[in-house]
Amino acid sequence: MTFSLVGRSPDGSALGVAVASKFLAAGAYVPAAAADAGALATQAHVNLELKTRGLAMLREGVAAGELLQRFFDADPDRAERQAGVVDRDGRAATFTGERAQHWAGGRTGEGPEGSFAAQGNLLAGPGVVDAMVDAWLASAAEPDLARRLVAALAAGQDAGGDPRGKQAAAVLVVSAGGGYGGLGDVVVDLRSDDHPEPIGELTRMLDLHDLYFGSTPAEQLLAHTPELDGELVRRLAATGYASGDLGRDLYDWMGRENFEERWHDDRIDPVVLEHLRRTTG
């Protein structure tokens, strides 16, 4: 009923999970990740304890494969479980109990494209997992881990996915200090809980996430000039910000529009300028 890919970026700076399922709000149950531990997916007959105790074990330095062995050896319902793990050091492991509904299985890899654990149960066939792996390996040059993970989901869906249909999808990515304002580790945490095209909805939300929380390279930021500042004053006034202090007006407008992560004291982000132009005509 579920297919997922747990992955680590090639440089080891980010870890994440993407999942899709004909199961309401699968993102609330399947994925877990911590920048100082690793990332994992628990599925089939979900054991939620893996999300807490498993991350704690990873944080203590237990390797991915050892974690799954120790955890499921002590689980009386292990025959119905499925899980995938990538630890903080890039070691990957997957587990499929013998009573997980057919087709069920998984693959792992620890190459230069970034470590991964791909798995699924109640799938159209092994081609679903193979397609996810192929997409993962082919996207190594993509720096955005969330995009790689969602692209792998899309490939799995195109290969047949869950034969019962579509309902939910989610993506979770963590990186030390990479969260909002640099004050947390959660880079992306998006869920499509009940949608006819949940993976497509995730892609749409990732586009919005990039718009609001993305980063423009420093060399592409725009310097203040009399001409640009004059345009900013006019356009900001059209939105109701006309205090006479351009810096304050721009800062306040950007906060209203949820662009605070794109604020720079002495430069203008061209993404912000384009949004201002588009919204003021």
Image (tube, helix red, strand yellow):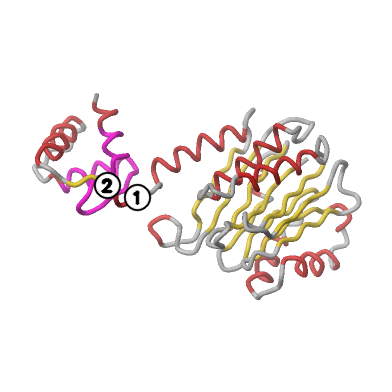
Residue 158: image location, x then y, percent = 70, 32
Toward the viewer: 150 or 183? Answer: 150
Q: Quadrant of the C terminus?
A: top left
Q: Which residue is mark 2?
A: 221
Between the C-alphas of marks 1 and 2, the distance is 7 Å
Residue 250 x, y percent position in the rendering: 20, 43
Looking at the image, is 157 positioned above or below residue 181? above
Task: State the SS at label 2.
Answer: loop
User: Magenta region's main secondary structure?
Assistant: helix
In this view, the residue in front, 63 or 83, is 63
Q: Residue furthest right?
A: 98
Q: Amino acid at mark 1?
A: Pro
Residue ID at (72%, 40%): 131
Instruction: Give the residue at x 34% y 50%.
Output: 217
Compared to residue 180, the image places residue 253 above or below, namely: above
Pointer 1 with pointer 2, Cβ within 8 A: yes
Find residue 34 and report its image quarter.
Answer: bottom right
Q: What amino acid type is highlighted by mark number 2?
A: Leu
Where is 125 relative to 100, above or below?
above
Q: Which residues are magenta?
A: 247-276
Image location of residue 146, percent across then percent down: 55, 47
User: Residue 217 bears which disc, if any?
Assistant: 1
Name, please, the residue furthest toward the bottom: 60
* Relative horizontal placement of residue 127, taking residue 198 as reference (left or right): right
